[in-house]
Image (spheres, helix red, strand yellow):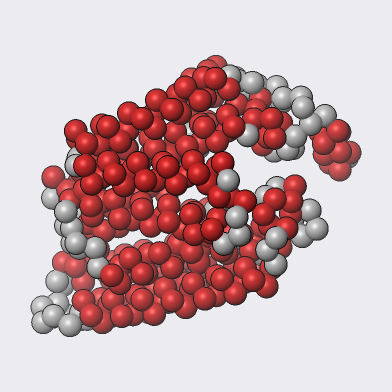
Amino acid sequence: MAEATFLRQRARPGKPAPPRRGGLLGGLLRTTRPRQWTKNVLVAAAPAAAGQLFSRHALGQVALVFGLFTACAAAVYLVNDARDADADRAHPVKRHRPVAAGQVPVPVAYAVGGTLGALTPAAAVWLCSPAVAALLTAYIGMQLAYCVSLKHVLVVDLAVVTTGFLMRAMVGGVALGIPLSRWFLLTTGFGALFMVAAKRYSEAVQMAGTAGATRALLTEYTAGYLRFVWQLAAGVAVLGYCLWALEEGGAPRTGVLPWRQLSVVAFVLAILRYAVFADRGSAGEPEEVILRDRALALIGLVWLAMYGLAVAGW
């Protein structure tokens, strides 16, 4: 029965799905992918790593940057869905997206996305700093280029998605004028590449033989290559974190235990636990992997506690 339904849907590629209830505003909100907003919590990474997160000024700036980055991502999603509306109508799942289903007209999606994309960096100049505005502008430009062409270029597509995560991790530090450690950038960048490549590998495994129907570029990658990428990225991320922990821990210690160095254990365990899902081909969206696995979430909390104790000097 399910197979017959799928074939009927594929046989009517140009017909939009019935629009959901909620009207235009509800459709616009769904198009901005609220479930993806959790990724933007990374804007707190640099201030937290530097131990400068919990002042009133820092919390205000981080909350502001979170909102600005969310608006930028929303602009990209709106333009992407407007551009891909016809193609999405041929997909059994994406045809239910508000733009493809007709709940949000294509011109409206373009207009709202373009307005957000133009106004958000301008607001950042006034509310934060020109450096934050420049970073947000670069993010929007890079993501729009990805939507138009870069998602069809081997390896470059992985680099662009990874850079998007890295920009999230950087922008909080840029907003507060915090110098970004080279080890922080190395660990964050390769940690993001590990999760991105693991997700691509999982898609390739799950859609073997029909990968092009979901993400055309997957037909150009081999599962072995993607496995190599996520394994390499995991190794570099662990090495970078170890060097970061040892270097930052070189200052005189005032706490009871060397928490920063001990946090290496929790970090490595988290990588190993995440790699279980990558190896099985079940590593989807990073936030979903973390939230659905209690052991991984617990390891993450232990790591946060250890790192927090290190920053606090306990």
Kindly indicate the quadrant of the structure image that contains residue 132: top left
Q: Position of residue 226 (x, y in %)?
A: 62, 68
Quarter of the figure that contains the C terminus: bottom left
Q: Is residue 68 above or below residue 45?
A: above
Across and down, in percent, residue 121 comes to 30, 36
Q: Residue at x 60, y 26 (%)?
A: 99
Q: Is residue 77 above or below residue 157?
A: above
- Residue that sits furthest to the top in the current view: 23
Q: Nearer the viewer, residue 142 or 257?
A: 142
Foreground of the two, 106 or 250: 106
Indicate the position of residue 26 as horizontal and vertical percent values.
Answer: 51, 23
Q: How many marks?
A: 0
User: Residue 31 or 228: which is nearer the viewer?
Assistant: 228
The answer to whether residue 107 is above or below residue 86 is above
Image point 27% across, 41% down: which residue?
A: 133
| Residue 37 visible, this orientation | no
Which quarter shows the N terminus? top right
Looking at the image, residue 233 sits to the left or right of residue 266; the answer is: right
Give residue 188's quadrant in the image: bottom left
Where is residue 189 shown, x and y percent of the image?
Answer: 40, 64
Report if residue 225 is visible in the image.
yes
State which quadrant residue 192 falls in. Answer: bottom left
Horizontal side, residue 302 vs residue 129: left or right: right
Q: Residue at x 36, y 30 (%)?
A: 118
- Give the residue at x 25% y 36%: 124
